[in-house]
Image: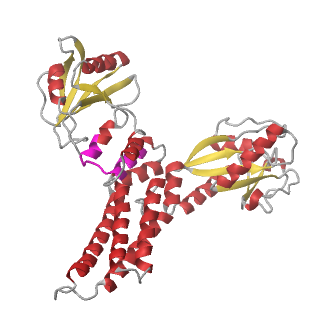
Amino acid sequence: MTARTDTIFALASGGLPAGVAVVRISGPSSFEIARSMAGELPRPRSASLRTITTVDGQFLDRGLLLVFPGPGSFTGEDCVEIHLHGGRAVVTAVLNSLAGFTSARMAEAGEFSRRAFENGKMDLVEVECLADLLAAETEMQRRLASEQATGNLSAVYDRWREKLIYARSVLEAELDFSDEGDIPGSVSDRIWNDVAALKTEVDAAIANLKAGEIIRDGFKIALAGKPNAGKSSLMNALVQRDVAIVTPIAGTTRDIVRCELDLQGYKVELFDTAGLRETVDVVEQEGIRRAVRTIEEADLVLELVDLSGPSSWVAPLGRSAVRIGTKWDLVASEDPKGDCALSVSARTGDGLEALRDYLLRAVQERTHLGSLAIPSRLRHAERLRAASGYLRSAIEDEMKPLELRAEDLRLASLELARVTGRIDTETLLGKIFSEFCVGK
């Protein structure tokens, strides 16, 4: 990577106003700029109270100054952090003063992290997981991102690459030095078993993608049923606030109503759908079409059945669903669920805790993993599937010349390198770093 000659700066902390605001500076002119605004620099990585001024000496604020000489910094470059009072006017004045230096400019979204990547402080997997960590809203999202941001997932990919590099080196030794006495006549027998075992590991990681997606993006639950089956009431009861409109008029819900639920650290997305029935209302027909599409895409479908009235509805398009009896409070029986898995009352709250436990078990069953060092992005899965395809070609086509089988291993190794960003395109990098906020 070529060295950066410009210095960047940005607000690196949260929204203003705040108790403390952190302005980050990175680049070759960082220390010079800091001296111009705060005087003598403190010892590296030691916070020191300084008066922050403009270049011509006008007072801006008193705050903490920290310096991080490269390469021992987040970006791998010389970095400075200025901890200020978090008022909008204070931060704006400091940023305007920084903009007055000809060697400095405002950072673009994700530019600090991009420099860290370019300077070898992080690989692409760790960068993506850092973005996930910043966006994490639930405990399981935090755990997934933390496991991967610390390099555990990258270590798995690197270990696979090292195995392939070793296998290729042995094969190429046989090809190049087969007439030498110290090279065994046939090394394939002890290589291909290892390659087959590696392919099994790669395929297992691909199979875990859905679990990773559920933890990262949320477990999607569709509430489906006839009109007035209690879908909107149940959604409001589960999230404990009025999200969906509830009326006794059939067909009130026309569009998809979505809300999020934190279920003991798991992100759950609830979808209230239009009541399924035959109708001539054009608007309601569109709502039902959208409901069917949501049901198809859901990880779990709850078929809500009104226990106080007859119901013969079956989940559409052959999709299996879990039947949940609603309006328990309108039924005299103490256990009216019949062929339903559970019975609930949104009005009294009866059965809601049992339903939450049921949903939690459903999420945990889909994400039951020994380790969270698993792929959670489609980009990873695409590269892993390509690598698996090359490995299959190398293993199964035993009649293929050894040179071509070795080439399959090289291509598989290349796909793994693309996951961590050792080899990649500028377009992909731009897309990934644009997901970050300015200042990170």
Q: Is residue 117 magenta?
A: yes
Q: Which residues are magenta?
A: 115-132
Q: Is residue 153 above or below residue 26?
A: below
Nearer-the-camera pick, 20 or 382: 382
Nearer-the-camera pick, 181 or 57: 181
Residue drawn at 46 percent across, 49 percent down? 141
* Left or right, residue 387 beside residue 365: left
* Left or right, residue 260 beside residue 89: right
Q: Position of residue 143 (x, y in %)?
A: 42, 52
Nearer-the-camera pick, 395 or 437: 395
Quadrant (top left/top right/bottom left/bottom right) for the C terminus: top left
Q: Is residue 19 magenta?
A: no
Nearer-the-camera pick, 193 or 314: 193
Report which quarter residue 401 is drawn in: bottom left
Q: Position of residue 342 (x, y in %)?
A: 72, 57
* Dominant secondary-structure state across the stretch colored magenta: helix
